[in-house]
Amino acid sequence: MKLHEYQAKNILKDYDVDVPNGIVINDFNELVNIEKVLTYPTVVKTQVHSGARGKAGGIKLASNFQEVKDFVKSLLGKKLVTHQTGDKGLPINTILLEEGIDIQTELYLAITIDGSVSNPIFISSSQGGMDIEAVADKDPNAILKTTINADIGLMSFQSQEIGEQLGLHKEIFPQLHKILTGLFNAFINSDSSLIEINPLVVTGDGQLIAADTKFSIDDNAAFRQQEIFEIRDKTQEDELELLAEDNGIQNYIKLDGNIGCLVNGAGLAMATMDAIKFSGGSPANFLDIGTANNPDSVVAALKIIASDTDVKAIFINIFGGLARTDIIAEGFVKAKKEGVIKQPTVIRLAGTNVEDGKRILNESNVEFELADGFAEGADLVVKVSSK
């Protein structure tokens, strides 16, 4: 789960990470109540779950109250389109008004999990204020990775190493250690998958301030991070993914292709998408239905796939283990007869109760294409999708 910038900063403040003073508004009329407390310049920042907001016009610098009003009026209630959001954009329901700060140096700092060592890792660079991917491409040596033992925590020598790599004056090292410690504790205590500060700013008077922040929480930790998950902004999330979640389908991800996929097992789902690509097509989603031994669960999954206007054909690829292919077949037939599916559908069944599953399909009097093998099914659905 992603947090908005202002939400992330509120959490970081609890861990002694310095952030600029700011005020959040959700309605244009709220400006009347805060005019006297604003200082200038004021940074007007749209709160959407996307990077590159500045490049897309979602961050503006106001030098007086009239400019604040004009910027807020032009942004609030609209949609922000960035290269990360796609053409649909994301709704701007909240704006953060933040004090301008005297930026002398911009740095990059993040903490995430390094799966290769099963521990948190700090990623830092002296080239802040830009995409870290671009820095990695142009100058990989400008990025320092520091692994932290999760049981021991951050060590002082590691803070010093990061400070030296960032080119900071030694008198700033204590501030850096405080920020690194705060980030580590926030990361662990909130079950985060990523906390990123970009830029981490050195001000004219030698202060370290987190000027912009991204914060992502592991969805699997929702049961013990209920307070954080209560501030989740679902307006920033894909409608079909939310619909899948409401129907108990935890493994649906919307993609940009035109072939809908219903598969059991994450590995088979990934292989199915690869097969479609190899056959010249493009998957419209990742959907692992798991052990869905209930026809209604199959209908719910197919309803989500079929409701995607980008989907021109559907590939049902099931290798039954604990999942029964006859139940999958029943669910498909039910969905077809109820008018849930309008798109042509290719089905490949193998494994548990496969003969029963094929019999149900063949006796159903509904339209579908049956494939004997995995590759054959991928080839067939790509051909069907292009008609």
Image (cartoon, grey):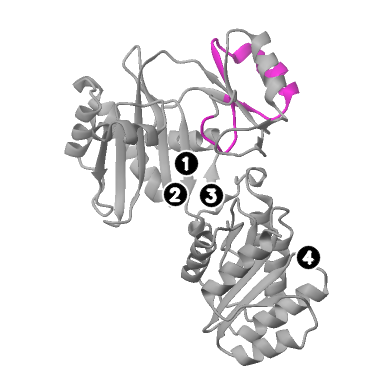
Provide the residue span drawn in magenta: 23-52
Camera-near label (4 vs 1) is 4
Secondary structure category for the residue under label 4? loop
Q: Return the disc, 3 or 2, that comes first in the chain's sequence.
A: 3
Examine the rendered structure and indicate whether residue 239 appears above or below residue 65.
below
Q: Residue furthest left?
A: 157
Instruction: Note whether residue 271 is visible.
Output: yes
Task: Kindly check if marks 2 and 1 are in contact, taking CB atoms under 8 A apart as contact.
Answer: yes
> Of residues 308 and 293, which is closer to you in this image?
308
Camera-near label (3 vs 4) is 4
- Residue labelled with disc 4: 342
- Residue labelled with disc 2: 190
Residue at 49% x, 60% y is: 220
- Residue labelled with disc 1: 215
- Measured from the top left, where is residue 239 in percent x and y? 68, 51
Q: Return the disc, 3 or 1, that comes first in the chain's sequence.
A: 3
Q: Return the disc, 2 or 1, that comes first in the chain's sequence.
A: 2
Disc 3 to disc 1, C-alpha distance: 8 Å
Q: Return the disc, 4 or 2, that comes first in the chain's sequence.
A: 2
Disc 4 to disc 1, C-alpha distance: 40 Å
Disc 4 to disc 2, C-alpha distance: 43 Å
Secondary structure category for the residue under label 2? loop
The disc label shown at residue 296, or none: none
Mark 3 is surrounded, within 10 Å at the Cα level, by few (under 14), some (14 to 19) or many (20 or more) other residues, namely some
